[in-house]
Amino acid sequence: MTSQPNAQIPDGCAFVIFGVTGDLTHRLVIPALYNLAESNLLPEKFCVVGITRKEMSSEDLRASLMHGLRKFATRPVNEDIADKLLYCVTAVSADPSDPSSFDRLRERLEKLEANRNTGGNRLFYLATPPDAFAPISTELGRSGLLKEDGGAWRRLVVEKPFGTDLASAKALNEHLLSIVSEHSLYRIDHYLGKETVQNILVLRFSNGMFEPIWNREHIDHIQITVDEKLGVAHRGSFYDKTGALRDMVPNHLFQLLSLVAMEPPSHFNAHSVRSAKAEVLAAIQQQSEEEALRNSVRGQYTAGKVGDTEIGDYRSVQDVDLASNTETYAALKLTIDNWRWAGVPFYLRTGKALGAKRTEVAIKFKQAPFAMFRCTPIEELSQNYLVIGIEPVEGIALQFNTKIPGPSIAIDGVEMTFRYKDYFKVAPSNGYETLLHDCMIGDNILFQRADGVEAGWEAVQPFLDAWEKAGAEGLQSYPAGSNGPEDADALLARDGRNWREPS
């Protein structure tokens, strides 16, 4: 997170973490809070309440969190800052299966708030498995912990995945919105904390050169890629019930798609931006199951080597069904039914155990007529791409053709590249800093709204249904360390296109 001189300091509050002993809290949440503290972006009147299911002393919890901070910190740990942050951590046990524990939590929290003078503001962060969202929020509502009174705010933060299909997403939205208002509900997606992702809005709407050509008249197609080198590892139980499509497309990839494809919002505020994003997701063409099968590829990795690391067959992972049809790779072709994007295909792909880690958005512009340069075969000319790189390199690249120096006209492709690290001295972060800060100041511009969540699931539901009915039929295998199943190339090749190779 870039430290900005005009950044708002949040009001005093209690930061209540459910799942405080879990991996997410140790790996991301506490390191992000530390980075905020180091940047002087935490309130002075502040406390962290870690909710454990079993009794645990505050001293033991602090020691565990300090160990995690030292292990996962993105920058050198200043012991004084770390001690000050963790000194305000208190362990409290509560379990939704025991409603009385939430009544005791309320009493304990009120005493902590009085001691720390937080003003009664509360942020409840559910760093838990998705099946815990409903029971925890139910008890928070019943016990009055989420009730706003005396001018104090109450906010509820939930992690992805938000539902497992359209029906479950609607049910979860309905349940949570019966307890808290949409304005107080923060559906967090860590991709939106990345500087380059946020920069898509700035790139599009603050530069007069891009918006006039950001449409079907000038853009041939758009590719969105989220490739991972890691396999499923120890997450077999979760992943085998989820798969690449559910895990990545309705959230990460659709967040990128919506930022790239949305109409200009009337104002740069949460309501306008989230409305524009929801509208473009709702405009994704609904496909029949037959169309979904034709316009998608799914794959599952087999044993192979990623760099120097041997990765076993997906079905050999602990807790994965030996006959599993769960996809570890998904590629989709989508279209958007509106004036700006009619006829422009959007190709999305994501997978695990691939040869390289890469997250990018590649905008392919239409080919220029080359009648002037008959001596140069078109296939030898560089394609015009604007590439927004998110991982591993954050930056923007523009590919175009230019003349090779010399007496004759010869053409070659070149690339102009902007990299964040070359221009800005930014302290290392994990992407959660911006999101946690926004939760505390009440800015939900980077968080999904109910209609956007449901529009995303509605777009992928035909693929889920078609793949479930197809079973093993159509599931391609690909060796770990490769670029994915060969049919993913065929998905574009039949349209006379190809995936962009990294430069």
Image (cartoon, helix red, strand yellow):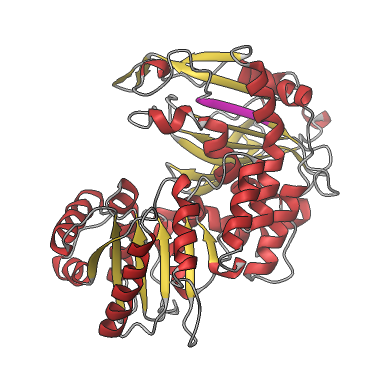
Residue 225, x across and y down, in percent: 56, 35
Q: Split into 4 quadrants, where in the image is the N terminus?
A: bottom left
In the displayed structure image, the side of residue 359 where residue 366 appears, left or right: right
Q: Examine the rendering and report whether any part of residue 458 can be seen.
A: yes
Q: Nearer the viewer, residue 325 or 93?
A: 93
Q: Nearer the viewer, residue 85 or 123?
A: 123
Secondary structure character of the magenta stretch overall: strand
Quadrant position of residue 178: bottom right
Q: Residue at x 23, y 67 (%)?
A: 90
As drawn, 166 above or below 294: below
Q: Examine the rendering and report whether any part of residue 40 can be seen.
A: no
| Residue numbers of the magenta segment | 328-332
Q: Nearer the viewer, residue 220 or 89?
A: 89
In the displayed structure image, the side of residue 503 where residue 83 appears, left or right: left
Say if the magenta span includes residue 310. Answer: no
In the displayed structure image, the side of residue 331 where residue 67 appears, left or right: left
As drawn, 121 above or below 430: below
As drawn, 339 above or below 103: above
In the displayed structure image, the side of residue 135 where residue 110 appears, left or right: left
Q: Residue at x 73, y 26 (%)?
A: 292
How many discs mark residues in the rendered view?
0
Residue 107, x across and y down, in percent: 32, 75
Quadrant position of residue 201: bottom right
Q: Nearer the viewer, residue 333 or 163?
A: 163
Residue 12, x across and y down, in percent: 37, 81
Q: Residue at x 71, y 42 (%)?
A: 458
Residue 128, x across and y down, in percent: 40, 50
Q: Residue furthest right?
A: 339
Q: Residue at x 48, y 88 (%)?
A: 150
